[in-house]
Image (cartoon, helix red, strand yellow):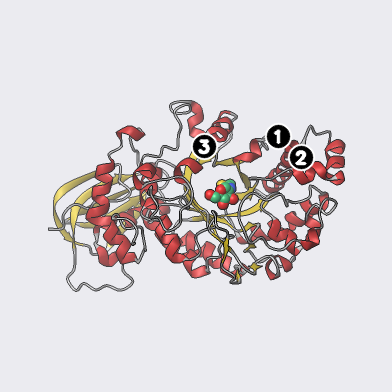
Amino acid sequence: MTGEPNLIPAPRRLVRTGGEGPVGEVRTSVDPALGPEAYRLTVSADGVEIVGGDDAGIHWGSQTLRQMRGLDAFRRAAIGSEPVNVPYVVVEDAPRFAWRGFMLDVARHFLPKDGVLRYIDLLAAHKLNVLHLHLTDDQGWRIEIERYPRLTEVGAWRPRTRMGWGEPVMWDERPHGGFYSQDDLREIVAYAAERHVTVVPEVDLPGHSQAAIAAYPELGNSDVIDTSALGVKTDWGINPNVLAPTEAMLRFYEGVLEEVLDIFPSRFVHIGGDECVKDQWRASPTAQERIRELGLKDENELQSWIIRHFDRWLAERGRRLVGWDEILEGGLAEGATVTCWRWYRGGIAAAKAGHDVVMCPQQEVYLDHVQAPGPDEPVPFGWVHTLEDVYRFEPVPPSLAGTPEASHVIGTQANLWTEVVEDLGRLDYQAFPRLAAFAEVAWSQLPAPDERDFEDFDRRMNAAHYARLDALGVGYRPPSGPHP
Ligand code: TNX
């Protein structure tokens, strides 16, 4: 007997029709009536058939079948010699959200291309379909821009790195760096597309830009500080060294974005917008002059002026701007979509104003945060988000649920910042198993948080899914807790 399929994420409907048989050739077809990304998987004595609402639907159906085929379907090389039987079933399935994302910060710690490709495989295996790549930050610039070579010659490298966030302050005294060539990124985009994953690039501005300023000091507020003395940042936190709000800066970033658009076909392009400290703009005669010239009220409106510029610029090129929820301050740009990270508030306001929103609150789905209370987690950072907490995360807050504006919540995303995630081992440990719970939240139609059957999810994890992650070679946090 093959037992229960124990699928993750849980499908809408699964009926066992009795019996089981080997998987031969899989017949596939498209029936648009099923809807985007939906599929119907039928396994019977007649063989296996997957009907998708589109090609993505067929792909997600094949991921479900893969789970039913057993562990060899997750290994790099099969070790079983017996053909496995799969149970006869009819599975009908469709995603709850169109944007089921994972944000990976490759700026704080660079993740070489192979690691990114591996994560694309892991996302696809969990029916997640957006990889948001955070490509630039104070601590590193990771995307080759041909017209501005110093961005990676200078901005991709730092001499040492602060270890952890807390006291005592410690440094690893090791050079760190790296970047993706444009060919690397094209390969990543194509690999993702084959797996129905869209790569959404992020170039963070006007805050979180010190690596760019280190490369091109004229981008910073040189009338306030000596920007030529700034290096790539080696420690963490909110940083006062931000871009100067000048026409020259806008032209520079248009040049950057032109190359970004050429590499990434994604409709959505993320321009950051988070945590831009306005102190230098307050002190800068150039910035103050700009505020007067443009007839703006304050520095928030000045940030908004920058974001609106790129909103229009992207729209003219058939793309849509995405930004963190700080872009609401000073007025939300007309076409903007918001990734809401500071609880739900900005997302609710944006949805009520008719903007699309991706919910990724820091209080719920920040996978850099610890996953258990107590002193034993290897990287003691952030609030506690246990596996159960993530399983009970609800992307649509009560004040939007049931209203027409709820349809503006186009999706949800788990974010993994990498200040304290320095290699693939740590990345796996922080991401899994929580990303499996998140995938179920993003895909499945789950009841309200309090009514969710976490025990059932946990049972499916223990009965089947941890073994799949083992077969995939994922170094997840063991359910028994970290190694001493
Ligand atoms: C806040 S979330 C940030 C990041 C940090 C993260 C650490 C967001 C848009 N900004 O720069 O890495 O907290 O959890």
Amino acid at dot 2: Leu
Dot placed on the residue nearer the N-terminal end, 3 or 2: 2
**Residue closer to the observer: 427 or 461:** 427
Can residue 482 be seen at all in this image of the molecule? Answer: yes
Label 2 environment density (alpha carbons within 10 Å; few <14, some 14–19, many ≥20) = many
109 displayed left or right of 70: right
Cα–Cα gap, marks 2 and 1: 8 Å
Residue carrying label 3: 343
Residue carrying label 1: 330
Q: Answer above or below: position of 115 versus 357.
A: below
Amino acid at dot 1: Gly
- Numbered mark located on residue 302 in the image: 2
**Residue closer to the observer: 57 or 33:** 57
- Numbered mark located on residue 364 in the image: none
Determine the secondary structure under disc 3: loop
Residue 442: x and y, percent?
Answer: 41, 44
Residue 224: x and y, percent?
Answer: 83, 50
Residue 95: x and y, percent?
Answer: 39, 44
335 displayed left or right of 14: right
Picture quarter containing residue 453? top left
Determine the secondary structure under disc 1: loop
